[in-house]
Image (cartoon, helix red, strand yellow):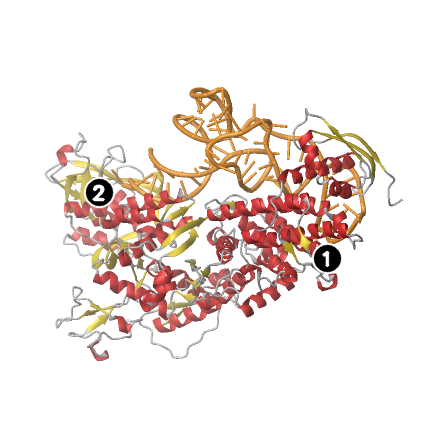
Amino acid sequence: MSKAYPSVQVTDPNSLPKTLEFPEMEARLLEKWTAEKTYAFDENGTKPIYAIDTPPPTVSGSLHVGHIFSYTQTDIIARYQRMLGKNVFYPMGWDDNGLPTERRVQNYFHIRCEANEPYVPGLDLPPILSTMTDKELQEKRLPQRNLSRKNFIEHCHKLTVEDEKVFKKIWSHIGLSVDWNLEYSTIDDRSRTIAQLSFIDLHNKKEMYQVEAPCLWDCDFQTAVAQAELEDRELPAAFHDIEFQVEGGGSFTISTTRPELLAACVGVTTHPDDARFKGLIGKFAIAPLFNLRVPIFGSEVVNPEKGTGILMVCTFGDQTDVQWWREQKLALRQIIGRDGRIQFTEFTDPEATENFSKILGKNVKQAQKIMVEMLQASGAMKNPPKPIQHAVKFYEKGDRPAEILTTRQWFVKLVDKKEKMIKLGNQVKWHPEYMEARFKNWTENLSIDWCVSRQRFFGVSIPVWYPINEQGLIDYDHVIVASKDQLPVDPMSDLPKGFTEAQRGKPGGFIGESDVFDTWFTSSLTPQLGSHWELNPARHKKLFPMDLRPQGHDIIRTWAFYTIAKAMIHESSIPWKHIALSGWILDPDRKKMSKSKGNVVTPSQYLDEYSADAVRYWAGLARYGVDTAFDPGIMKIGRRLAMKLFNAGKFVLQNSAIAGEITEPLDLAFLAKLKAVSEEAVKSFEAFEPGQALMEVEKFFWSHYTDSYLELVKTRTWGEKETDQEKRVKASAVHALRLGLKTFLKLFAPFLPYTTEEVWGWAFASESKSVHHAMFASTADFEGITNGNPSVFDAAMAAQTVINQQKTVAKVSIARPIVMLKLKANAETIENFKLAQFDVCGATKTEKLELITDASMEKNQFVIEECEFGPDAKK
RNA sequence: UGGCUCGUAGCUCAGUUGGUUAGAGCGCGUCCUUGACAUGGACGAGGUCGCAGAUUCGAGUUCUGUCGAGCCAACCA
């Protein structure tokens, strides 16, 4: 017994929009979704949860099509999971603290943070950037206004709130199905509390330490930076050959790219097997100009081929200098200050003092120039500088090479956990799989612990104070950590327990830590920020570990890495079960789109020109991990698809039908194929290949549904029918058409949420208020329907194509009647074809048909033996 | 120097575990205004799958080498 469908009435054509007006529809449906709380997460719900660890975008950055691209991909997964009946946890956070914001705020208000400036209550400066461009500001060279730390932070808050509105508007327009009740920012009270809780937990577990040691340092931002935040840049430089004397007679020539560090020279090294310098090892060298007596030692690390094969070790020219300094217990002579200028350094030798005074206070570049001149004058410079091109480490947001300075910083122990991290990383499913290699690679090569303290202002405070002893010295060994009930805490204004404000900065009192955390320290906790972690253990248990982390592949070494590290140290857990890495959007020259390259394309114009669904189509088609060229042409196709769906929906719903079953072989054949396609779509989604699903569904929709099936059944469905038999076969087609439409709406819903919701509302709202809560590829829809034979559809479509072809070649209209047609095919094809003969003849206006069997032909191959066109109906 | 991706039509990309004659869309050409859709439709031209080997009855697909592009790291005196 097959499934019976109730009768359907014609949907009043006047009630359906004539044309698809995207802006009107988008605005209306956005309102509907908000009013109906379509995307709300049900915290007390019993349905299985699907939790997404949404990347909090940096709101101070520019919003470009790359963002739209990756966030839409996540939304497509979210919508799919919701349509599986899951309780989807899909929050949006704003990453608003850190250097990018400070820099933007500085430019926007033309201000600077100055620690000694007094606080001005109620200060509310107007933006300068709205009246002047970046360029004008630079040209006019107006002095920046100095603001106290507190005033500066207030302005940071003020601007980020505005930036967040811009993001939220675009996110909504593109149709992200986030639950806006879950909105947060990485600087809000809860985030600060959770980040500080993280610190306290790490500190209790002895996984945090502070130490005065060589650290990577950016001289412009005047802050420590982490290994992961460095990038290589190719710069021109030169080898300078400088002659050193050997104590007790003799000399040798070293080669260096950093002659300005000669005064910081603390040793000389060469390869122990290098015959040229072997004899020098163990002796002392005398550096020129400064008469520095430094040890000469051997090191396997030295490459005899490079430079002169012997080199000077400084405080600190690069990472290897640090290594040698540690291994050889060399002296420390830090001549570069925190501002990147040569700082005062004491020399006992009068000549050294004299020479050093010439570079004192200069920046690295100026000092190098002066140094070279002095060396040339003294005769210690053996050859003219040899220009080379070499890679230099930069802080990724900085403009000057990173220096290595000895400063006191907080670190998280990571180097001792590499193996465990790789093991945990392996428990996470990476999409695409090969991306795990990048994580492994980075983790294996990690050489420095994670430096998390930053000498900045707009960030989460490190929740500690230090006692000041009776001599007025800061006692770093007895850190006073904030207690959990104090959080969030700002040690610069809040008090450690048992102290009074009067004791701040006084002997016997305390001093607050002024450093803030690296932003990654907070953003590595996004799963915990979402679950509320220690603040709400019950909720945390439900949401953690999360199901999915979507992110870009360029931040595997930072965001993914640190998040895995945090979950491991806090709870010995993975932070999420899956991580999906989206590709980059490249400009037409295949360069990554980024603000610094000036090739950024903003999304608004494309949303307006092609519609949100069309832009989503473009994003939805891409595979994970694959970089994609920006191509509005794809959006055009997406727009066409949305229109086609809209029009097909209108057509299908304009047919009435009596109650009945789907009985006709062609209808059943179509549904059998549709069912197979929707099962394939599910498989693709489960394999994190939604683009594959979209492609297959789209192809089938276009070729089989609109181009073929809709045309084939028009004779049966058009108009009112007289006989019961006619009514019955019409009903079979109309019910199949409607089931087809409903299925397509659901399959397309994750990609085209607006258009599908619009059409769904015309006919299927009684089943589910929104298509976005309908069951994706539900088997129930096909239950009780007789299994069709797909070959019937193949034969009918093949015949339809060959007849259309005949008309095209003959250059006659598709509507032209055929008074006599002889078709040749093999027996099986003819048998299948006969079951759909009525529909094919109707669609092709074939009035008389003769079938010829030819066993030599392949399946579904038709040849027209004879074709006689009737008179043109128009004439 | 090592690791990982990619190389298919003029362009943007598919091509699942090796299996007939390598697919789609855009663009291009010819034709058609037929009852939802001209923001349409029908049909067509266009590829020795970077190159060279190997395995196999059979390779776009597996392996080796090679060239080119990109990314990540190491080195950076």
- Tell me where residue A485 sits by quadrant: bottom left
> What element does badge 2 sit on?
strand
Q: Name the residue nearer the viewer: A252 or A331.
A: A331
In the rendered image, residue A481, in percent from the top left (x then y), is placed at 22, 68
Chain where mark 1 sits = A
> What element does badge 1 sit on?
loop
- Tell me where residue A336 sits by quadrant: bottom left
Q: Is residue A249 left or right of residue A875?
A: left
Question: Residues under labels 1 and 2: Cα distance?
Answer: 90 Å
Q: Amino acid at mark 2?
A: Met
Which circle marks residue A312 in the picture?
A: 2
Q: Name the residue nearer the viewer: A116 or A465.
A: A465
Which circle marks residue A611 in the picture?
A: none
In the rendered image, residue A247, in percent from the top left (x then y), is placed at 12, 40
Image point (86%, 38%), residue name: A870
Count neighbours of disc 1 (C-alpha within 10 A) and say few if under 14, some if 14 to 19, many if 20 or more: many
Chain where mark 2 sits = A
Q: State yes or no: discs 1 and 2 in contact (Cβ < 8 Å).
A: no
Compared to residue A805, the image places residue A193 above or below, namely below
Q: Name the residue nearer the viewer: A169 or A683.
A: A683
The residue pinned by badge 1 equals: A656
Q: Is residue A377 visible?
A: yes
Q: Judge depth for marks 1 and 2 and give the one in front.
A: 1
Q: Amino acid at mark 1?
A: Ser
